[in-house]
Amino acid sequence: MAHSIKHLFRSPLLRNASQLLTANVVAQAVALAVYPLLTRLYTADDFGVFNIFLTIGGILVLLATMQYEYAVVLPRSHRQGAWVAQAGLAATAAVVAATAASIPFASGIEHLLDADGLARLWWLMPLYVAVMASWALCNFWLLRHDRFDRAASYQVDQSLLNATTKAVAGKMSIGGGLIYGSVLAPALALSITLLRTPRALWRKLCRIEWRGMRAAAHRYRNFPRFTLPKALTDSLASNLPLLLLAPAFDLATVGFVGMAFTLAHRPINIICSSVNKALYQQAAQHVQCRKPIRHSIARYAVGILLIAMPLFALLYFALPWLCSWMLGAPWAATADYIRLMLPWLLMVLVSNGINFIPDLFDRQRGLFLFSLARLVLQAAALAIGISLHSPLLAMGLFFAVAAMLLVAQTVWFFALIKNYEQRL
């Protein structure tokens, strides 16, 4: 055990991740530190509307980039990488325009989701999509040029600005302060990052060549064809509770579930994202040079399990006290939902850290099929819980299905690696 953990931290392929992970830990610490204040400034209903806004916004951001950001690091030349990023930015402009066209229908969207207060804030949605999609593409452009420092600084800036905006808006009793913070903070952080980064890096990205852009979009067409549907089904599957529990129960239930995702899934997702980007960059280089990758991938998977399992066991018993102390007594129900999440979160740590493997071998279709199965089975799980009028049962079944599918998905990842290395 000690040998595996030692190798995990000394592994060269995780050195770049250290900058991202350190910044993300700081950013997450800031976000968590402000939540005891936010839960006393905003109601569970406020958080319910906020979670619904972010859920819809997240789906639109996926559509905006067409998932081309993950292809930015794959071409051999920076010129071709710029073409891929430009294809994503062109798609972003189209989706932002379509989102802006939906503003007159905001009241109908609010009524459909039973989310009081959503309509008056819907005008912020196009800006949210534009900023978040642009950052997704610029982030991988920075990583392609080994500017992990700039990608890391964005995370810290965004978190500090987000926490400050939400807290100030809450103190001033500004309605929708949670949403204002989530839109304005990333916009300001992106602007700061652009100013801090050498102009030569952005000039390469701004030198538009339409023929090259079209060629890159065609070359990496599997990303919008398979990776995008996979990401959409993943997002929809993960966020189904936030969309379905309000009409079935109430906005407060959505607030509790959303808070559970925020406190438990977001830190795990940040770790996975940081490690994933560093692993992806190096694995892509190894595959280009026809080198083996199984050893480093397996070392990550085993090491993270050995670290996480005992920590999660301790967390299970500490959660009721921890949530009540941190958020306040009215939020005690959040602990019940986080407990149900723990087996799924363990597999998220393993599988999401290496879920770029199908991209390396143009096997995105298989990953999409896993996501589609997850969406169908998790929708069925929620339906059972909702029909029995039990949000806890609905979420317990929801996370159990997700955990089992991630186990199967991880086994498939290693089968793909084995098949690749047998051909070397």
Image (cartoon, rainbow, N blue to C red):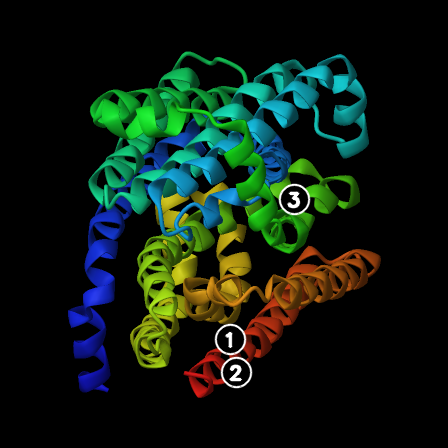
Residue 291, quarter of the rendered image: bottom left
Residue that sits furthest to the right in the current view? 387
Residue 366: image location, x then y, percent: 65, 68
Q: From the image, which quarter does the C terminus lie in? A: bottom left
- Provide the secondary structure element on which disc 1 rests: helix
Q: Which mark is residue 242?
A: 3
Q: Amino acid at mark 3?
A: Leu
Q: Which mark is residue 415?
A: 2
Report if residue 106 is visible in the image. Answer: yes
Q: From the image, which quarter does the N terminus lie in? A: bottom left
Give the distance between the C-alpha atoms of the residues marked 2 and 1, in whole angstroms. Answer: 5 Å
Q: Amino acid at mark 1?
A: Phe
Q: Which mark is residue 413?
A: 1
Residues 310 and 182: in front is 182
Q: Amino acid at mark 2?
A: Ala
Give the distance between the C-alpha atoms of the residues marked 3 and 1, in whole angstroms. Answer: 29 Å
Dots 3, 1 in contact, CB < 8 A:
no
Dots 2, 1 in contact, CB < 8 A:
yes
Q: Which mark is residue 175?
A: none
Please tell me whether residue 185 is drawn above or below residue 71 in the rendered image: above
Q: Who comes first in sequence, dot 3 or dot 1? A: 3
Please tell me whether residue 228 is drawn above or below residue 395 in the rendered image: above
- Left or right, residue 30 beside residue 284: left
- Left or right, residue 1 beside residue 93: left
Q: Who comes first in sequence, dot 2 or dot 3? A: 3
For disc 1, the neighbor class at 10 Å (few under 14, some 14 to 19, many from 20) is some
Q: Residue at x 78, y 17 (%)?
A: 105
Q: Residue at x 66, y 61 (%)?
A: 368
Residue 315: image location, x then y, percent: 37, 66
Report the mark closest to the observer, 2 or 3.
2
